[in-house]
Image (tube, rainbow, N blue to C red):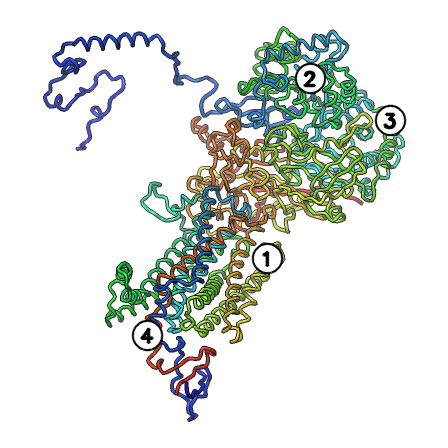
């Protein structure tokens, strides 16, 4: 590097060189460090699939797989013995099960948001992270789907909740008034669209892999999966349109899924559940937790898979900003809930919120406040947003906080409802904890396998945002806001 | 035309003469040649139709063998299909037989439901003038004791299974030996209320001069008899009339829960407290919070040593008013103003008041007698002429017996319905005495603490297998008939006693009949034939005969009040506690009473009506004491008295006297059976005998730390209503001055759901409910509600479909309590219904909220959304599951199940159905009879069992039905009405009648 001039990309004025005239166009932000060639990008991203996995991957996979085995054991035990092996009781009919369900559905939100909404808003930074975020979505929704099935007293009759006709039970339908049925529709739709979106987004990359494949089997698999992609202009043109249409279809789902999940609570009459602000509040919370989980995953993978070049600090910075914003929406919702309880004057609701802050589960509430209200406030400084270690801790806090948010909403509302004679405490059992841990095992096992067998970064999209001038630029990895221009 | 064959062709009519032509093969059908004969086409063996020599030999061999084998066939057993059944047993149709409860000595009259030859449900006999249709929790649960696995299946001799003849021989030998010697033959039994059994005992007296009958009750009322003897010259327990009393003062007498005849008293009490009339005033002085105390208008907590002082203080005031005699002021710690006010009320209602005391102290009872006498209650609310025969024990005779046994003066001891090795305060001495007795025969139904030390156990029938009679109150008789043939090789106690007496008549049924013919039949004039009299008596179960003696002269009180008062004051001063020394009060708990039903899982799981604790006893302490000693619920403390010690977990009891610890008796059985063994701690050893009476309180007790802590299985943990509209209360004055409220329901957007012919609903009168919990067990029996055990109760997984919520208000040292039966409210706008994803819960056109078990997948969403928290989830399989080793695990225990109610499997939700099976039955009966269902024809199990008739079920569409009238009552309201759930179950406000102190 010879002479270099510093340009503030996001700065209001000040062009780097000379004349004092406002530049017509700000230099573009570049989302890949080190100015790799297209060939190098393909090599870098295909490397985890083609090489042998490193020690780090094996350790992570070993732990995740053990947790998955534990899930299998726990669920078998649960189904063999009955729901009684959980700590649930007549007062608290839902606890870890539905908490985990809502938690995982929430995690599943970031993927579609990143790929659909950010696509529509032409946010180019999404290109490095959308593939893994979508994969995360699918695995998270799988984890989420597990819980409604196993939380049933008679899981072997779980198919009763699907509308099927004609059936042997005569004109017997599901109860369309029940939010649990809406959940079935919302989540299955979401899973379907997410899967399609994820898969279609991968087709050009699969074709690349097909072309690179050496073995016969690999060639066959990738060849089949890439649906005969030929990379012609016509293909690309149609592909772009399909992507846009799918993005348009997926966008309302981002908002609908968690809105409907929130109606499990909002349409009930239980104080703490029965509140109209739940849909937006849950959506914000879902995006917040989703971004938290994306951060966690990408921070791990970028270092274990040597992808720092593609998932840069600037990406982390962007994600931290979304996290902060949604965290603040969530905090506002918390405040609104308390305000509503006080201002609304409903005896039961007022008691519920006093109990939330001072009752036996107050520690959960304060942990939630610490993680979801205070922690995002630490992201105001750029230094914080670009410190990998700090962001990792924050992302873990977000995950913990959002799990506890659901726990607080579900358990604290149930444990002291209308009749004080029916009040009681919930204490988790080893099976409760085991299933929760096991669901993480399922999630991480799937994710770790995913990064080994499929391209975890959308190669074609990255190449698309590199731009022609990119070859001329070397990007500083130190300061995402500063771009060093080679002269 | 239809391709089907004509009906004639296709149907083969059985017995129709013209059978269609059958063909045997296609050839036959096509050729039309009918092949006949046994072997069409000839025998396969011969070929040419000729038998070879080989064939001949084979056939010969077969014939010989067949001829020989026919001689050794198995015996023919003809199974016969039921064409014409028994006249009495129609499968699927229940019969009801009147009988008499032997769950305790109260001897309530019962009507027992028998289905397919099995008794499955206890109900009260509404024809009884004394007890009415109600029962108590214990009575309801006795049916389960019939199917107890722990019952002995045959008699035992020296612990080994024996034949009855063998035991009879041993007993006969022993009796012969005893008759020749100087040692006594003793029958030790509980109070005997059966007149025919008393007659048998009289025959023993006549036969053996050295025969003695000693009666012994673990919880005794002997002081009442002794005091009445000295006060009035009658050694009896009077028959009390709470219904005639305008003012009731209870002194440590839990007459609504356990004392003397709780079913009868609860009925009388509630009848007298209807706010529509002029309700009585009830003042209760007691140390621990009893069911009775929790219902009192005024409740004053006093330590046991002060109860006598309160009686003296009241007498002091009454005597002053009456101007008779001088009774010293006792100086009790109770606020003098309160005592003045109580005395004023008593005096105002002379002849219409009642003072009762459960303290087993002759002096206290003498003062109580003086009070009732001074108030003119004798002959009005206290009937000495027709006394209660439900307790006829003299504690002194038991003490004498134990002494005699230890001196070796008893040769043969027969034990019937007693368990002194468990419940006598000097159980060790009793057991030592047993060893010095030549023959000990127990008639116990199981190996228990006492019978396991006996030489022979001759198991008595369960009362549902036995004939019998009872006379709970003089001249009021109740008959008992068997509902099932004895399940095991047991023999009724009376038959054993007749056999051992070598009586001419050893069949107790015949003896009983003869006894009734000789002794009771002549006392009435209406029925001429004894057979008619017997049949009628047996059918109705109850007979009220004219009194033997006319009560012309009212007995005059001649007790020594001065001496009694002095003794009380001296005793109280001696017991005076201070510092770290406390008093302990022992009481019978509603679920377990004196411990005889300790192996009954229904009772073990029944929450105590006041504390809501199940499966164990505890030391109830005042909240102030808890704080003072820095304890928390469940901390185990050692209660140390001069005579022994107990280790019990403490439990906070609002309203408990701060110097007194209350401990329930009846727990801590060592030998009773799997369910009840070692549940809780036995407190009987800490009781003692003083001045000829068993005392159930002890002073100068230290509460030592143990450092241990135990979990108590409570079913309700929060006792404040938090200002919510759950139990609504009013005072009598408010109610009388307020105009009748018009009930305007909240608007609803939902269509009217009740388009059926009926609209089933319920009204629960909070003013009548005493919290006795009979309904809880009744519901459990009727609806096959499983028992889940202590561990599951700790996890808040009790299955009871009806529970009784108990709330306190006011200061914790002197709280006001209410009992609220809570079951599914059968909402018209049911929150459970909308949220179920599979429509497993629906509202019927007749207003019932129905649970469809087959459809339920167990999401528990309905339970979460139920504001009343009445839904119960099957967390496990509670039947046929070794983890839940209660009645539903054993084939014998399952015999109690109601075949009309499905047993729920794991993973489904369940709840109160308003006894839909009873509704359906009544509808079918009405349909068959071509008539309308009459109001009151359907009684839910809870309603039926309620001694106070606090629960009324009926058709809300009928404006004249009782339930409609009650729901229109100005006291009527619905729980959490503001939620808009529109329950079909309504409640009637509790009305308080506060005592005005000036």
**Which residue matches tag 2?**
B440
| SS at mark 1 in the image | helix
State the separation of the CA atoms marked 4 and 3. Answer: 116 Å
Quarter of the figure with residue B925: top left
Residue found at the far bottom of this picture: A19
Q: Are marks 4 and 3 on the same chain?
A: no
Q: Chain of mark 1?
A: A
Q: Position of residue B933 (x, y in %)?
A: 48, 31
**Which residue matches tag 3?**
B560
**Which residue matches tag 4?**
A38
**Which residue matches tag 1?**
A356
Upstream in sequence: badge 4 or badge 1: 4
The answer to the question of whether label 2 and label 3 lie on touching residues, with beta carbons closer than 8 A, is no
Q: Chain of mark 4?
A: A
How many dots with numbers? 4
The answer to the question of whether label 2 and label 1 lie on touching residues, with beta carbons closer than 8 A, is no
| Rendered position, B923 above or below A29 | above
Q: Residues within 10 Å of mark 1 (few under 14, many from 20)?
A: many
Quarter of the figure with residue B855: top left
């Amino acid at each position: 590097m010879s002479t270099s001039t510093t340009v503030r990309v996001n700065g209001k004025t000040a062009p780097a060189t000379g004349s004092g005239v406002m530049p017509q166009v700000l230099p573009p932000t570049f989302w890949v460090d080190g100015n790799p060639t297209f060939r190098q990008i393909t090599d870098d991203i295909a490397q985890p699939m083609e090489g042998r996995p490193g020690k780090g991957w094996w350790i992570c996979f070993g732990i995740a797989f053990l947790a998955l085995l534990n899930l299998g054991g726990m669920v078998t035990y649960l189904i063999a013995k009955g729901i009684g092996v959980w700590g649930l009781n007549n007062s608290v009919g839902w606890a870890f099960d539905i908490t985990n369900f809502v938690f995982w559905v929430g995690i599943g939100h970031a993927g579609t948001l990143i790929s659909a909404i950010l696509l529509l808003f032409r946010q180019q930074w999404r290109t490095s992270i959308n593939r893994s975020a979508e994969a995360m979505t699918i695995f998270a929704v799988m984890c989420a789907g597990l819980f409604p099935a196993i939380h049933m007293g008679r899981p072997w009759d779980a198919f009763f909740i699907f509308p099927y006709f004609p059936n042997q039970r005569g004109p017997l339908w599901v109860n369309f008034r029940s939010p649990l049925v809406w959940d079935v529709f919302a989540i299955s739709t979401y899973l379907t669209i997410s899967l399609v979106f994820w898969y279609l987004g991968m087709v050009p990359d699969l074709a690349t892999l097909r072309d690179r494949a050496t073995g016969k089997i690999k060639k066959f698999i990738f060849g089949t999966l890439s649906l005969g992609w030929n990379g012609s202009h016509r293909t690309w043109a149609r592909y772009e349109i399909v992507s846009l249409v799918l993005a348009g279809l997926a966008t309302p789902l981002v908002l609908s899924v968690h809105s409907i999940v929130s109606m499990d609570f909002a349409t009930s009459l239980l104080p703490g559940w029965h509140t109209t602000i739940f849909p937006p509040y849950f959506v914000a919370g879902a995006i917040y937790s989703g971004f938290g989980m994306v951060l966690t995953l990408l921070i791990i993978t970028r270092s274990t898979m040597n992808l720092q070049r593609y998932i840069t600090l600037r990406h982390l910075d962007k994600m931290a900003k979304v996290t902060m914003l949604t965290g603040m929406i969530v905090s506002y919702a918390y405040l609104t809930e308390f305000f509503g309880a006080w201002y609304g004057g409903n005896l039961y609701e007022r008691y519920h919120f006093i109990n939330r802050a001072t009752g036996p589960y107050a520690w959960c509430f304060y942990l939630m406040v610490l993680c979801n209200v205070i922690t995002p406030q630490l992201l105001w400084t750029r230094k914080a947003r670009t410190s990998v270690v700090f962001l990792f801790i924050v992302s873990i806090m977000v995950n913990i906080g959002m799990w506890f948010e659901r726990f607080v909403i579900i358990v604290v509302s149930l444990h002291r409802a209308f009749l004080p004679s029916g009040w009681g405490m919930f204490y988790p059992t080893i099976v409760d904890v085991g299933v929760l841990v096991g669901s993480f095992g399922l999630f991480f096992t799937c994710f770790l396998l995913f990064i080994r067998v499929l391209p975890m970064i959308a190669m074609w999209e990255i190449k698309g945002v590199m731009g022609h001038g990119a070859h001329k630029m070397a990007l500083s990895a130190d300061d995402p806001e500063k771009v060093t221009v080679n002269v | 035309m239809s391709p089907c064959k004509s009906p004639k062709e296709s149907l083969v009519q059985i017995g129709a003469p013209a059978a269609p032509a059958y063909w045997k093969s296609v050839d036959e059908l096509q050729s039309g040649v009918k092949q006949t004969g046994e072997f069409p086409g000839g025998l396969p063996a011969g070929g040419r139709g000729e038998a070879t020599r080989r064939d001949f030999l084979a056939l010969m061999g077969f014939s010989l063998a067949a001829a020989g084998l026919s001689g050794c066939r198995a015996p023919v057993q003809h199974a016969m299909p039921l064409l014409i059944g028994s006249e009495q047993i129609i499968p699927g149709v229940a019969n009801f037989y009147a009988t008499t409860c032997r769950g305790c000595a109260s001897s309530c009259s019962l009507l027992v439901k028998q289905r397919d030859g099995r008794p499955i449900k206890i109900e009260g006999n509404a024809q009884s003038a004394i007890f009415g249709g109600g029962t108590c929790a214990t009575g309801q649960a006795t049916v389960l004791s019939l199917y107890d696995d722990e019952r002995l299946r045959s008699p035992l001799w020296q612990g080994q299974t024996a034949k009855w003849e063998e035991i009879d021989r041993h007993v006969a030998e022993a009796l012969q030996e005893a008759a020749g010697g100087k040692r006594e033959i003793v029958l030790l039994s509980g109070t005997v209320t059966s007149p025919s059994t008393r007659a048998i005992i009289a025959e023993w007296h006549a036969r053996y001069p050295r025969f003695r009958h000693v009666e012994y009750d673990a919880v005794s009322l002997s002081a009442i008899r002794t005091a009445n003897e000295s006060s009035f010259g009658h050694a009896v327990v009077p028959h009390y009339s709470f219904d005639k009393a305008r003012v009731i003062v209870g002194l440590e007498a839990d007459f609504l829960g356990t004392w003397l005849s709780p079913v009868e008293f609860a009925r009388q009490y509630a009848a007298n407290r209807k706010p529509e009339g002029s309700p009585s005033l009830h003042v209760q002085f007691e140390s621990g919070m009893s069911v009775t105390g929790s219902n009192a208008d005024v409740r004053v907590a006093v330590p046991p040593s002060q109860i006598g002082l309160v009686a003296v203080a009241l007498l002091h005031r009454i005597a002053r008013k009456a101007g008779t005699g001088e009774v010293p002021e006792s100086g009790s710690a109770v606020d003098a103003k309160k005592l003045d006010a109580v005395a004023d009320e008593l005096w105002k209602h002379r002849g219409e008041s009642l003072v009762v005391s459960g303290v087993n102290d002759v002096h206290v009872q003498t003062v109580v007698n003086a009070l009732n006498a001074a108030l003119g209650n004798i002959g009005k609310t206290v009937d000495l002429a027709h006394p209660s025969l439900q307790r006829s024990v003299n504690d002194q005779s038991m003490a004498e017996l134990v002494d005699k046994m230890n001196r070796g003066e008893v040769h043969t001891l027969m034990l019937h319905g007693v368990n002194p090795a468990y419940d006598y305060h000097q159980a060790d001495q009793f057991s030592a005495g047993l060893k010095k007795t030549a023959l000990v025969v127990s008639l116990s139904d199981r190996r228990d603490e006492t019978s396991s030390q006996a030489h022979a156990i001759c198991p008595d029938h369960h009362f549902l297998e036995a004939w019998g009679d009872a006379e709970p109150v003089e001249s009021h008789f109740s008959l008992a008939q068997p509902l099932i043939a004895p399940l095991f090789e047991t023999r009724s106690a009376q038959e054993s006693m007749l056999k051992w007496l070598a009586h001419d008549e050893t069949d107790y049924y015949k003896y009983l009949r003869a006894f009734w013919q000789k002794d009771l039949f002549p006392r009435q004039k209406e029925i001429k034939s004894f057979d008619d009299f017997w049949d009628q008596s047996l059918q109705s179960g109850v007979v009220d005969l004219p009194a033997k003696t006319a009560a012309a002269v009212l007995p005059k009180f001649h007790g020594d009040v001065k001496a009694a008062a002095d003794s009380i004051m001296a005793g109280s001063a001696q017991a005076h506690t201070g510092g770290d020394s406390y008093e302990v009060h022992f009481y019978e708990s509603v679920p377990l009473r004196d411990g005889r039903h300790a192996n009954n899982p229904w009772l073990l799981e029944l929450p105590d009506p006041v504390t809501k604790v199940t499966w164990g006893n505890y030391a109830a302490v005042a909240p102030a004491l808890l704080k003072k000693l820095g304890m928390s619920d469940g901390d185990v403390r050692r209660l140390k008295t001069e005579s022994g010690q107990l280790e019990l977990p403490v439990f906070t009891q609002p309203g408990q006297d701060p110097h007194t610890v209350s401990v329930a008796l009846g727990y801590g059985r060592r030998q009773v059976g799997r369910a009840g063994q070692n549940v809780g701690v036995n407190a009987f050893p800490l009781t003692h005998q003083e001045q000829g009476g068993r005392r159930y309180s002890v002073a100068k007790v230290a509460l030592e730390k143990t450092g241990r802590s135990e979990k108590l299985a409570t079913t309700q943990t929060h006792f404040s209503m938090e200002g919510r509209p759950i139990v609504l209360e009013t005072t009598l004055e408010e109610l009388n001055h307020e105009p009748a409220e018009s009930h305007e329901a909240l608007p609803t957007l939902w269509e009217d759901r009740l388009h059926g012919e009926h609209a089933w609903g319920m009204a629960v009168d909070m003013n009548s409910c005493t919290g006795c919990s009979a309904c809880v067990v009744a519901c459990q029996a009727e609806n096959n509600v499983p028992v889940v055990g202590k561990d599951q109760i700790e996890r808040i997984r009790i299955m009871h479909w009806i529970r009784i919520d108990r709330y306190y208000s006011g200061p914790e040292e002197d709280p006001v309590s209410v009992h609220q039966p809570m079951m599914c409210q059968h909402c018209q706008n049911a929150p459970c219904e909308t949220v179920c994803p599979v429509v497993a819960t629906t509202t019927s056109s007749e207003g019932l909220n129905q649970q469809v078990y087959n459809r339920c997948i167990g999401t528990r969403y309905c339970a979460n959304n139920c504001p009343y928290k009445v839904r119960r989830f099957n967390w496990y399989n509670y039947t046929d599951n070794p983890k839940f080793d209660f009645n539903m695990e054993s084939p014998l225990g399952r015999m109690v199940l109601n075949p009309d109610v499905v047993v729920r499997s794991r993973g489904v939700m369940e709840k109160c159905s308003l006894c839909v099976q009873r509704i359906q039955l009544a509808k079918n009966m009405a349909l068959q009879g071509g008539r309308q269902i009459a109001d009151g024809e359907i009684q839910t199990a809870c309603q039926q069992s309620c001694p106070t008739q606090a629960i009324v079920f009926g058709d809300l569409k009928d404006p004249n039905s009782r339930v409609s009238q009650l729901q229109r009552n100005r006291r009527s309201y619905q729980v959490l009405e503001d939620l808009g759930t529109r329950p079909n179950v309504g409640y009637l406000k509790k009305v308080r009648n506060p005592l005005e102190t000036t």
